[in-house]
Amino acid sequence: MLDFFLVALGGGLGSVARFGASQIFGASPGVYTILGINLLGSYIMGAVMPWSSAQKQRGRSFLGVGVLGGFTTFSTFILEMYGLAHGPGFMQAFIYGVGGLGCGLGACWAGAFSFSLLNARYDRAEPETELENEEIS
């Protein structure tokens, strides 16, 4: 039951953050605002999910499903592609869709890579407690 509450709380926070970003960068979310929000969310997802999965399911529920699920918006991304296909043309919609998905995957990978670099640096600074415990046994 706590996981449902964490998802709802995180989703509310993520949705408010997305709404705030759309107000700052344009009252009516446009193609570039939605793309930017989704790329930022993909980067954060890549960086945060390895940490949150290590911190148990509740971190994943709150951060991944809740906050980042509320912040990013696949449905609006699709709606923007639909609008491009029926307005400026199919090719712009295709480039936006393929480019957005490709850049999103790249942003997620970059976030995961950034996390691994920070984690490696932190691991070098802290002694390995698991190995120390095994040596004592």
Image (cartoon, grey):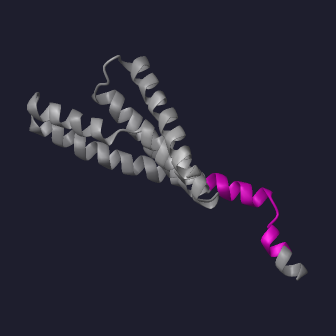
Quadrant assignment, res 55: bottom right
Residue 122 sits in quarter = bottom right
- The one of 28 and 39 positioned closer to us in this rendering: 28
19 displayed left or right of 67: left
Specify whether residue 127 is in view.
Answer: yes
Residue 36 pos. (x, y %): 39, 33
* Residue 114 appears in the rendering: no
Residue closest to the far bottom: 137
> Which residue is at a point 79% across and 56% down the rendered structure image?
125
Magenta segment main secondary structure:
helix
Is residue 35 highlighted in magenta?
Answer: no
Q: Residue at x 29, y 25 (%)?
A: 30
Classify residue 123 as left or right of residue 34: right
**Total label count?**
0
Residue 93 percent across, percent down from the top left: 17, 38
Q: Position of residue 113 (x, y in %)?
A: 53, 54
Residue furthest to the right: 136
Magenta region includes residue 122: yes
The answer to whether residue 130 is above or below residue 66 is below
Q: Residue at x 62, y 59 (%)?
A: 56
Residue closer to the observer: 48 or 106: 48
| Residue range (magenta) | 117-132
Q: Relative to the observer, which residue lies in front, 21 or 120?
A: 21
Q: Which residue lies most toward the front here?
A: 1
Q: Quadrant of residue 99?
A: top left
Q: Is residue 23 above or below residue 18?
A: above
Quadrant of the image for the C terminus? bottom right
Residue 123 locus on image (x, y percent) = 73, 60
| Residue drawn at the location 62% of the way across and 60% of the way down | 54
- Seen in the image, is 35 located left or right of residue 125? left
Give above or below for 112 relative to 79.
Answer: below
Quick check: 27 above or below 95?
Answer: above
